[in-house]
């Protein structure tokens, strides 16, 4: 301990004057205004983000409803197609023309029997392949 201290020596403390107080007050006000601006910007960004989230949620609901409507429309289309095919086959069967099997009279001059006696009837592959199968 230094008992013989010089009373006029600087202690590191300074006198706080009104000018210092005004400066600190003005600096504090400027900082408050700066922080209020940052808060305002962040608040606006949060509102924009919330709005975008609501838009995306609404779009998701719209897409879900559209998907459900599309599935219902496809089911209806399948039902109508099945009904159409059933009616078409019924009408086709009602108006079908049946012809008895034809018999050829081979005694006429223009008619000839197929192989082994008359016309050579083979597939193209058999005709072009000379080796017997």
Image (cartoon, rainbow, N blue to C red):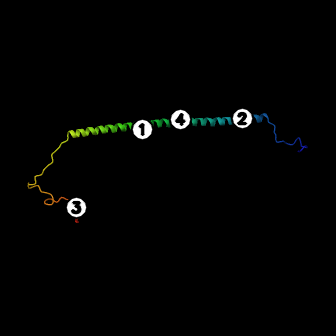
Q: Residue at x 71, y 35 (%)?
A: 28
CA–CA distance in space, label 4 to label 2: 37 Å
Front position in the image: 4 or 8? 4
Instruction: Say which residue label 3 marks.
Output: 126
Q: Nearer the viewer, mark 4 or mark 3?
A: 3
Q: Which circle's residue, 1 or 3, is located before the other in the chain?
A: 1
> Mark 2–mark 3 contact, CB under 8 Å?
no
Question: In this rendering, is residue 68 above or below 109?
Answer: above
Of mark 2 and mark 3, the one earlier in the sequence is: 2
Reading the image, the residue beneath label 2 is 26
Q: Which residue was labeled with disc 1?
A: 67
What is the secondary structure assignment of the residue under circle 4? helix
Mark 2, Cα crowd under 10 Å, few <14 / some 14-19 / many 20+, is few
Viewer-proximal residue among 127 and 107: 107
Residue drawn at 45 percent across, 36 percent down: 62
The earlier-in-sequence mark between 2 and 1 is: 2
Q: Earlier in the sequence, mark 4 or mark 2?
A: 2
């Amino acid at each position: 301990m230094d008992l013989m201290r010089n009373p006029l020596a600087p202690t590191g403390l300074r006198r706080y004057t009104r000018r210092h107080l005004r400066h600190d007050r003005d600096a504090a006000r400027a900082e408050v205004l700066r922080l209020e601006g940052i808060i305002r910007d962040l608040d606006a960004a949060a509102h924009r983000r919330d709005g975008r989230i609501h838009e995306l949620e609404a779009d998701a609901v719209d897409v879900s409803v559209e998907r459900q409507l599309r599935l219902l429309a496809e089911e209806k289309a399948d039902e109508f197609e099945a009904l159409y095919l059933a009616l078409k086959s019924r009408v086709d069967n009602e108006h079908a023309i049946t012809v008895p099997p034809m018999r050829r009279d081979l005694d006429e001059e223009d008619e000839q029997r197929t192989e082994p006696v008359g016309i050579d009837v083979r597939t193209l592959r058999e005709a072009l392949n000379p080796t017997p199968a």
